[in-house]
Amino acid sequence: MSNNSSLVVVGAQWGDEGKGKVIDHLAVKADIVARFQGGNNAGHTVVYGANIFKLHHVPSGILNKDTLCLLGNGMVVNPLVLMEEMSELEKRGIDTSNLRISSKAHLILAYHEVLDEANEKMLGEKKIGTTGRGIGPAYADKALRRGIRAVELTDFSRFKKRLAEVLPLQNRFLQEIFDHPGYELEELAEKYRLAVEKLGPLVKDISLILNQGLAEKKRVLFEGAQGALLDIDHGTYPYVTSSSTVAAAAASGTGLGPQRLGQVLGVMKAYTTRVGEGPFPSEDVTEAGDQLRERGNEFGTTTGRPRRCGWFDAVIARYAAMINGLTGLALTKLDVLSGMEIVKIAVAYRCNGKEIRNFPSSIEELKLCEPVYETFPGWDEDISRVRSLDGFPTAAKDYIKALENSVGVKVDLLSVGPDRAQTIICPGSNLSNWFIEK
Ligand code: IMP
């Protein structure tokens, strides 16, 4: 491991790759876990013994009582949802006192959620299929310099003053374009009074905490949300989220220099899924796709929407490896493929009669792409209890090898079920150092 004390974990498909579980496993050795982008559009399901935790803002590291959990400046935070999430965790005996919010993170307020829904409605058939959590409007306000930052939560009168500055324009939008009554200042501000009280003390300079932590050789895990193909710059625009989801954003989204980032682990499912609209070349709308959805329980954590399912796409995986600088893969949900007669990998696309191996940057071109598959024999054995690479049936081992070859990056970690115990660190993996005692 080049930089033993930090590790970035990112989604390398269209989100929902199982990052929560992987991060939860790695967080056991982390002193600090930091999120750097997105908001409560993310949904991580973490299974810990008999407990199932659904996390939206809070990093999965919260389950380890000594881990400091940071919400970075690159995030958008819904104060009401965050409070609810914290109280849900506390009710179940999880201490949340180790959570800190960057003073520079932007807030998602009630009108952002309304605007998100209204924008989608206006787009009609061309809708993005957002999570409806107000993510796009909150980032738009940040870019338009009319956002409200978490630092305003440190004092109610300060929060209200800033709200008074931005609300008239928001109301004009809501009333004149979207036929919404708008919000009354007093009433809206009061809605957030408790959030100011509860969250205000957690608002800190995250950049300082992280830089000091790294100087003291603390181990830092950066927790990505969504996935490479949903990145605002590199994803399937406009069918993307509104933040930078790639590894480099871990630096700008927390206030660190890029040289402080260490290994970059890309989480990929052994097949592919997508929620929301937009092109998806290896989508399988036949029985095989339905089988993947049922066996993999592919329904959104945040919205409950059924996920679109298809085969592993090595074209997007190679692209994700390139734009993130992946040093290793975490391959999840391999167990879901047990019982499939054959398994397929899209190794290239055919587009306008030509075979292409690189991911097209135009979605119009992407829409015309047909996957070129390599097909492999499946396996029947239940692999969810296997705890070492040797224990896999030959067909599963061959599939992993073929996948590594088609992506050009080695698998460091394998996941064969939702529980922490159902995780295998591959021999010679870059991650072995992460688990070494300091
Ligand atoms: P937004 O992030 O809510 O604006 O949604 C934009 C697109 O990103 C939609 O296609 C969503 O389904 C997708 N998206 C956002 N968050 C996630 C996630 O955590 N997993 C998978 N897809 C997501």
Image (spheres, helix red, strand yellow):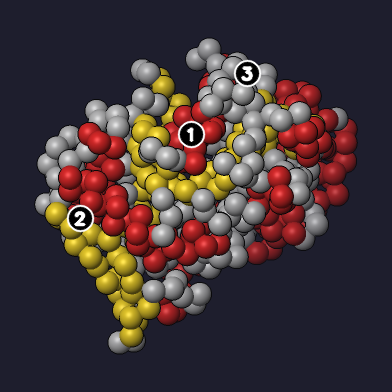
Name the residue beneath numbered marker 3: 66
x then y, percent, for residue 133: 56, 46
Q: Which numbered circle lies on residue 343?
A: 2
User: Which of pointers 1 and 2 indicates the residue nearer the eye?
Assistant: 1
Look at label 3 and name its amino acid.
Answer: Asp
Look at 44% across and 34% down and name the residue there: 21
Q: Quadrant of the N terminus?
A: top right
Q: Which numbered circle lies on residue 82?
A: none
Look at label 1 and name its amino acid.
Answer: Ser
Badge 1 crowding class, 10 Å Cα cut-off, few under 14, some 14 to 19, many 20 or more, is some
Please, is residue 109 above or below residue 366 in the view?
above
- Asked whether residue 69 appears in the rendered view, the answer is no
Look at label 2 and name its amino acid.
Answer: Val
Badge 2 crowding class, 10 Å Cα cut-off, few under 14, some 14 to 19, many 20 or more, is many
Look at 86% across and 49% down and name the residue there: 165
x then y, percent, for residue 152: 82, 37
Quarter occupied by residue 330: top left
Secondary structure of the residue carrying tag 1 is helix
Sequence-wise, which precedes: disc 1 or disc 3?
3
Secondary structure of the residue carrying tag 3 is loop
Please, is residue 58 above or below residue 72 in the view?
above
x then y, percent, for residue 24: 49, 30
Q: Quadrant of the C terminus?
A: top right
Secondary structure of the residue carrying tag 2 is strand
Count of numbered badges drawn on the protein? 3
Q: Nearer the viewer, residue 284 or 410?
A: 410
Task: Find the distance from the CA under tag 1 to the CA under tag 2.
Answer: 29 Å
Residues at circles 3 and 2 in contact by the CB criterion of under 8 Å: no
Sequence-wise, which precedes: disc 1 or disc 2?
2
Q: Which numbered circle lies on residue 432?
A: 1
- Asked whether residue 9 appears in the rendered view, the answer is yes
